[in-house]
Amino acid sequence: MGGRGRGVTLGSSPLRIVGVRYLNSRPLLAGLEEGMAAPFEVQFATAEPAACAQALSSGVADAALVPVAALPLLPAARVVPGLGVGCRGAVTSVLLLTKVPPERIRRLAAHTASLTSVALARLLLAERWGARPLVVPARPPLAEMLAEADAAVLIGDPALATVGASGLLEIDLGRAWQEWTGLPFVFAVWAAASATSPAVDALLDASLRHAEGDWERLVAHWAALHRLPVPQVRRYLTDILHFRLDGEDARAIQEFLRRAAVAGVMPALAPAASPLVAAPAVG
């Protein structure tokens, strides 16, 4: 994990928070990254999605932004209400790019650090197109991912730079999910160790409010950081994604986890661990 401590004390120990370093998570991390005032000491770091879930599971972190697909593996954690990364339809940053019709995909190149995107791709391929390809671990560039695979799941900045220009059959997984279910899709949520105080929820909510209160400056900053055009980043973070989750998002999470478990793509979520994300965060 990369990151830095912040001199911002939950008791005598600092609160350890891990976030995802991708553009789609920047608004949730804004206050934490910019060292906003907090009533206790915070140590903040960033990592890839799967590593965030592992940090929370192993006790290295007290709170983490975790892939929704990791929730069945985190039975001792609680979901922080009302905060996450969601879309309603096309997401533009999670793409299935294929050289063959989806029903003919036999080898799927994917960055396995992104648990939710890979699970969503496998679920859609199995249930919508009857394909159960072998998942081959791979990283961008796209040409290398496709060298020995029929298709690739491309996520994050590489997907944003490729969308509409790959020359391949391009399936936006956010749109494909909505077409299939009529629901939004949630990629990640904040989760915390069950013993953490509700003050943690308030801190994470304040981190997003920090972004909401200085949006244009931060959009320009994130665009420069990720080397993407400001208009594209503004549209992506303002119109395509949403970071405050409601009851429909909660239903979408439950439906994804249920369908993925039935399809054998993921383990089932224990009923007691069902994520309730519709309530507003403590503020």
Image (spheres, rainbow, N blue to C red):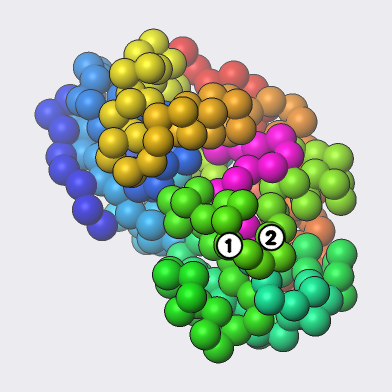
In the structure shown, which secondary structural element does the residue marked by tag 1 occupy?
Answer: loop
**In this rendering, which labeled residue sits more in front, label 2 or label 1?**
1
What segment carries the magenta color? 83-96
Relative to 235, residue 73 above or below: below
Could you tell whether 115 is left or right of 199 in the image?
right
- Cα–Cα gap, marks 2 and 1: 8 Å
Relative to 93, residue 184 above or below: above
Picture coordinates of residue 153 (x, y %)? 59, 66
Q: Nearer the viewer, residue 113 or 39?
A: 113
In the structure shown, which secondary structural element does the residue marked by tag 2 occupy?
Answer: strand
The residue depicted at 28 percent of the width and 36 percent of the height is 224
Q: Residues within 10 Å of mark 2 (few under 14, many from 20)?
A: some
In the image, what residue type sits under mark 2? Glu
According to the picture, the residue beneath numbered tag 2 turns out to be: 170
Could you tell whether 131 is left or right of 3 in the image?
right
Label annotation for residue 166 = 1
Q: Is the Cβ of the residue at disc 2 closer than 8 Å to that at disc 1? A: yes
Residue 265 sits in quarter: bottom right
Residue 82 sits in quarter: top right
